[in-house]
Amino acid sequence: MVSIVNSTGLHTMHLWTQGLAKRGLFALAGFNGGPEAVVPLNGTKGLLGTNPLTYAFPSDNGEVVIDMATSEIPFFKIIGAKKDNTPLPYNTAVDDDGELTTEPQKAIDDKEVSNLLPMGGNYKGYNINYLMEVMTSALIGAKISSQMKNGFVAEEHGGFIIAIAIDKVTSRKDYNTAVKDMNEKIRSQKPKRKVEKVIVPGDRNLERMKGMSDEMEIEVSEDYIKALNELTK
């Protein structure tokens, strides 16, 4: 596990996990997207970060790569909606009374304190957002959102990267067989009406990446991989 502290921002986390997955590792990473962005469940004022989570691991069709905020929508979407005077999707934000709103002007103030909902708008998403808040701050010695100044200028943000050597915890052959079996059953399932197919998480990213250059990825140095391998011995 590697911790990141005193950072101003990290907006493309999946490049780190994707690079590790390409080298056969199972990777999980998170970053504190706070402060004053996401309301606690049933709250009325943004306090937590959007706290993005990314994971990547070898699969039967390249690598599964996921990168997402643990808020229902990322912070930049509410900024864009306010600027363009366009409505927010339903069940993504609340006003200062804690009531659902699609009006960005009611969900974010002039100081950019937003009232975004945790993903799903329910306690399960709130639990994940809160977990990522603690893992990206208190756990690694970085500031938690309630201790930060508002904005992304101050070097107060933290994050983590966890890399697991699959063959140190299980048979790589068994791992490959299990993942392939699950993916085949998911993709072969009958889709609901008006949907073309059932997909595995990460399939849409693979479609978007077709034909794109590997130069867009961040290469992880072999010294870094060696250090991670030493930690797993």
Image (cartoon, helix red, strand yellow):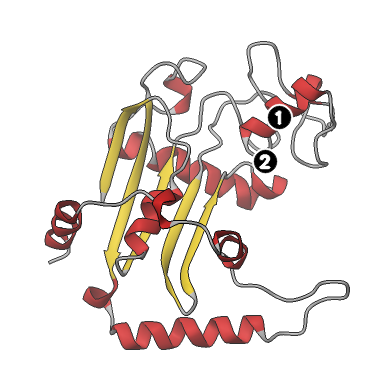
Coordinates of residue 140 in the picture (x, y in percent): 29, 38
- Left or right side of 67 for 214: left
Coordinates of residue 86 in the picture (x, y in percent): 84, 29
Q: Amino acid at mark 1?
A: Ile
49 vs 229: above or below: above
First in sequence, mark 2 or 1: give its number. Answer: 2
Per the rendering, the mark at residue 78 is 1
Q: Nearer the viewer, residue 15 or 111?
A: 15
Q: Nearer the viewer, residue 38 or 178?
A: 178
Q: Residues within 10 Å of mark 1 (few under 14, many from 20)?
A: many
Report whether residue 97 is seen: no
Instruction: Identify the residue at image location x=36%, y=20%.
Output: 155
Per the rendering, the mark at residue 73 is 2
Instruction: Identify the residue at image location x=42%, y=88%.
Output: 177
Q: Amino acid at mark 2?
A: Ile
Per the rendering, the mark at residue 61 is none
Coordinates of residue 182 in the picture (x, y in percent): 54, 83
Report whether residue 84 is seen: yes
Name the quarter where the C terminus is drawn: bottom left
Instruction: Identify the residue at image location x=49%, y=84%.
Output: 180
Q: Is there a contact, CB below 8 Å, between mark 2 and mark 1?
A: yes
